[in-house]
Amino acid sequence: MTAQETKRSFGTLLLGTLVFLVCVRSWVPASTYAHFDSDQAVFGLMGRDLIAGQSFPLFMYGQRYLLAVSVWLCAPLFALFGASITTLKLPMVAMNIAVVVMMWRGLRREENIGPWGAAVAILPFAVPTALIGTRLVEHAGGNIEPFVFTIGMFLLRDRAIALGLWAGIGFLNREFSAIGLIALLLMDIAQGVWRERLRLYGTVLGLMVVVVATIRLAARWSTAYSGNPASFGKPRIANIIGYFKQQLPTLLGAWPRKLGDFNIQSQVTVGHVAVGCALLLWTVAALYVLFWRKPITRSELGGMPTYLVLVGLGQSASFVLLTPSGGDPMLIRYLLLSLLALCGACALAWKRPEMRPLTAATIGLVSLFHLSGHLQLIGEYANGAPPRSLNLLADQLLQRHIRYATADYWTSYDLSFVTQEKVVVAPPLGSNFRMPSYDIKLEQHRDEVYSITNQPCTGGEQLLNWYLCRPPRAAR
């Protein structure tokens, strides 16, 4: 075996290790109901409708944004293997793997990085905290997809037609994806080549408009294309405080967080102060080297490391400027793309030989802390999945042969997917904006519709934390 073949085999081994780590951290959230809710259930129900020929969903039901890319990816799996939590989330895992492969491809083209440098730079994405790992395979319409679209934009940056089509679809899927085009433009401005690329950007923007207009027009004939477009907040001091106090430590695993506080069925706590201290010290050292001792060169401004940093920082800036509530812990999903900033910074630091030992040690230590959280979560579920109340409630409804019911939003669609629609549950008539077909079914079987509430009712039965109220006629 030649030296070149040995080097290529070693690179393949490192890439395979990164993919393996993605599969490890995705195992529990992608194969169990560890992290599931009605929003995710709606996408699963859309997939069931699609393969049954009952609908043609282009956007999430009841919304004019979140292009249903993930629905069209999981629908074939539903047709082949049935609708389940695994077939619902498997495309999300595949997109995580695609992100690793695309970053590997882009970083390996950089000078002075090599296979080790690329692997270290990708580790923050491949092994984030267990909390972030659940969000990266969450079927929510816009968590992992912006990673795929933004990194794809960099790889397609010199192909105007492909970039325009890709960017248009990405923008409709989640507006965050537009940060990728802004990052490309900033890089061209910094390198002084933006004038030469004006024609390319004109073509890209023109195609984006065509793609967006065409899909929006087609969506008028799709199912449940209604409601409001994406809404945004406004810049507030509270957003900055929430970003640094709540969101950034959660994203990086720099402060303890109980998974149970983030709608994850687990008693595990992840995040360590040591991680925050290690990353802070490394950041100070990296800034000193990259901006003082050996400043970033103009040629480096055109590479993937710089692009990743700009995309990540752009996502953080968007969060601070546009989020409706910076301190809401559940809004961490709007900051996920910021992980790319750490990946890009690691790659830039690796180009300075004196930074390699510190970078490898810091990222290695952080990854070990994060991996321990994933292993704890796996161990917890290997010994028996923690009971999930909505799954238990679903079993109770099936045992009673109940077919139709109403409940609040966060209970209804979750139950419908868990029971494979053997029990059709929706919010009361007039408040069901996600599944219009359910209104028809409940109306047709109004004498069979039970109510699931949090309050006692006459003639009702307590089931776990809920009360099962009989249909009005049966109650009389």
Image (cartoon, grey):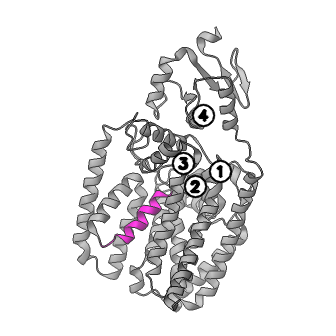
Q: Position of residue 305 (x, y in %)?
A: 47, 77
Q: Which residue is mark 2?
A: 135
Q: Was residue 407 drawn as part of the magenta stretch in this picture?
A: no
Q: Is residue 250 visible?
A: no
Q: Earlier in the sequence, mark 2 or mark 3?
A: 3
Q: Residue furthest right?
A: 383
Q: Position of residue 225 (x, y in %)?
A: 37, 38
Q: Which mark is residue 129?
A: none
Separation of marks 4 and 3 at Cα, in angstroms: 15 Å
Q: Residue furthest top?
A: 476
Q: Which residue is mark 4?
A: 419
Disc 1 on helix, strand or loop?
Answer: helix
Separation of marks 1 and 3 at Cα, in angstroms: 23 Å
Residue beneath the point at 26% across and 48% down? 214
Q: Earlier in the sequence, mark 1 or mark 4?
A: 1
Q: Quadrant of the C terminus?
A: top right
Separation of marks 2 and 3 at Cα, in angstroms: 17 Å
Disc 2 on helix, strand or loop?
Answer: helix
Q: Which residue is mark 1?
A: 262
The local crowd at label 3, few if under 14, some if 14 to 19, many if 20 or more residues have their Cα within 10 Å, is many
Q: Which residue is mark 3?
A: 87
Q: How many numbered markers are drawn?
A: 4
- Whether 327 is drawn above or below 3: the answer is above
Which amino acid is tagged 3? Answer: Thr
Separation of marks 1 and 2 at Cα, in angstroms: 10 Å
Q: Position of residue 144 (x, y in %)?
A: 50, 58
Front position among marks 4 and 2: 4
